[in-house]
Amino acid sequence: MTAPSVPVAPNVDREVLREAIQEEYEAVAREPERGFHFHTGRPLAQILGYRSEWLDGLSEGSIESFAGTGNPFSLGTLAAGERVVDIGCGAGIDSLIAAGMVGPEGAVIGIDMTPSMLEKAQAGVGDLDHVEFRLGFGEELPVPDGWADVIISNGVVNLMPDKQEVFTEMARVLKPGGRIQIGDILVDRPVPENAKEKIELWTG
């Protein structure tokens, strides 16, 4: 049996790409009412099937800057006491929903690379002491080995060039038997290699 081939990461400048993505999502954090080429906020949450009770009591700042592409909780709600890592948490809506599901006996770590998004996420924590937000990258998670029962992510993996690296890092922080619940973008035909090198196509 032939071993499966490891996908080759596209030839794109990672730092330039990160800066472009940060610029885009800083605008979503600071000017959520501006209008973007993607849906945002409470209308997006409704489109994606978020239950109204999940949003009850959440910070409006976290909700208005929501910019996901799917619903990780459609794959199953989280259990009380579970530890959760939210990769690319943005303004924190999924992390805060997760915190409500796992309760005070659980724990949630939200990770994002855009400081202005993390500011909004932190502002929405309120009196919850079992959720925290950390600056970091999906390829270098600031989380100990084997810490998480569940990894959630929403519209973020598609923005990372080296998917193998991302999923290897997820495997590192998951406990044996842990699970991944991702909402993201899939394409039904291969993207040309020269297109993958264009920063504007990653962000737009």
Image: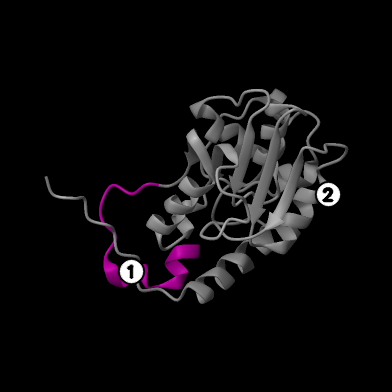
Amino acid, disc 2:
Ala
The x and y percentages for residue 60 are 79, 41
The x and y percentages for residue 34 are 69, 58
At a point 35% along the width and 65% down the height, the residue shown is 9
The disc, 2 or 1, on the residue closer to the chain's N-terminal end is 2
**Residue hosting label 2:** 123
In the rendered structure, the answer to whether residue 48 lies left or right of residue 115 reads left
Q: Verify CB contact (< 8 Å) between mark 2 and mark 1.
A: no
Query: Residue 195, labelled with which disc?
Result: 1
Which range is magenta?
186-204
The stretch drawn in magenta includes residue 203: yes
At a point 35% along the width and 73% down the height, the residue shown is 11
Viewer-nearest residue: 81 or 113? 81
**Number of other residues with Cα within 10 Å of mark 1, as a class: few under 14, some 14 to 19, many 20 or more:** few
* SS type, badge 1: helix
The x and y percentages for residue 131 are 75, 41
At a point 74% along the width and 27% down the height, the residue shown is 103
* SS type, badge 2: helix
Q: Quadrant of residue 47?
A: top right
In the rendered structure, the answer to whether residue 199 lies left or right of residue 42 reads left
At a point 26% along the width and 56% down the height, the residue shown is 190
* Residue at the right extreme of this rendering: 127
Q: Is residue 99 above or below residue 12?
A: above
How far apart marks 2 and 1 lie (CA) works out to 38 Å
Amino acid, disc 1:
Ala
Count every numbered label the image shows and give the total.
Answer: 2
For the question of whether residue 32 can be seen, the reply is: no
Viewer-nearest residue: 119 or 101? 101
**Number of other residues with Cα within 10 Å of mark 2, as a class: few under 14, some 14 to 19, many 20 or more:** some
